[in-house]
Image (cartoon, grey):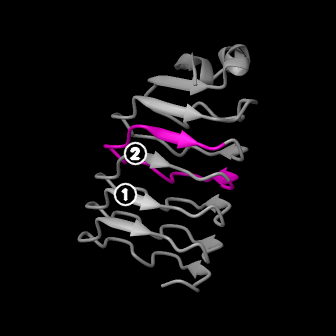
Amino acid sequence: PNGIMRIYNCAFQGCRQLTHITIPRSVIHLDSNAFQDCTSLKSVSIPPSTPELPNAAFCGCTSLENIRLPEGVKQISWYVFKGCTSPSPVSIPESCINIGPSFQGCNALSDIYNHRPTPQDISDDTFTHYGTLHVPAQSITAYRKHPVWRKFRIVAL
């Protein structure tokens, strides 16, 4: 309900009947594994009041599609979307400065829209599949020079 400020660790883990969620704007803290293995979850609406997506928050949500993170999200922690076999596209806001190894096993991930002008420093194990990366036009050269981002086919937003 509106008014809650935190969704605790493993709160909805394994809820296989959950298909759509809208996290209220009042939530400022989402704990690790909050929605892990919700295998029927197709969509989630994350409010801009949530600055961090914690470890494994949506790990194993195999039906999750079209991940659009709001402006205000600053960090995508470890394994947040690991094993999400359906997501495409993913939209990363300009506010996001840290991305951990979050998209492992997302083999259907064909398009990523990264709105940050400066490439985030990511590790080689952040992605296991490299499709098309859409970035600000003025940033294409910087992304092509990055040791990991350059593995994508890079085009202008």
Q: Which of the image's four quarters has the C terminus?
A: top right
- Is 46 included in the stretch rendered in magenta? no
Q: Position of residue 37 (x, y in %)?
A: 34, 63
**Residue 119: quadrant of the picture:** top right
The structure residue drawn at horizontal position 53% and vertical position 62%, both measured from the top left corner, is 46
Q: Position of residue 98 (x, y in %)?
A: 70, 45
Q: With respect to residue 68, does 37 lie above or below?
A: below
10 Å crowding of disc 1: few (<14), some (14-19), many (20+): some
**Residue 94: quadrant of the picture:** top right
Q: Which residue is mark 1?
A: 43
Q: Is residue 146 visible?
A: no
Q: Mark 2 near mark 1, Cβ–Cβ under 8 Å?
A: yes
Q: In the depicted view, which residue is nearer to us: 145 or 104? A: 145
Q: Is residue 56 visible?
A: yes
Main SS, magenta region, reads loop
Callout 1: helix, strand or loop? strand
The structure residue drawn at horizontal position 72% and vertical position 21%, both measured from the top left corner, is 139
Q: Which residue is mark 2?
A: 66
Q: With respect to residue 108, does 132 lie above or below?
A: above
* Gap between marks 2 and 1 measured at Cα: 7 Å
**Does residue 105 appear to the left or right of 48 in the view shown?**
left
Q: Position of residue 29 (x, y in %)?
A: 63, 73
**Nearest to N terminus: mark 2 or mark 1:** 1
Name the kind of residue labelled 1 in the image: Ser
Name the kind of residue labelled 2 in the image: Asn
**Does residue 2 appear to the left or right of 111 in the view shown?**
right
- Is 83 included in the stretch rendered in magenta? yes
Residues rendered magenta in the picture: 72-93
Q: Position of residue 89 (x, y in %)?
A: 42, 37
The structure residue drawn at horizontal position 28% and vertical position 52%, both measured from the top left corner, is 63
Callout 2: helix, strand or loop? loop
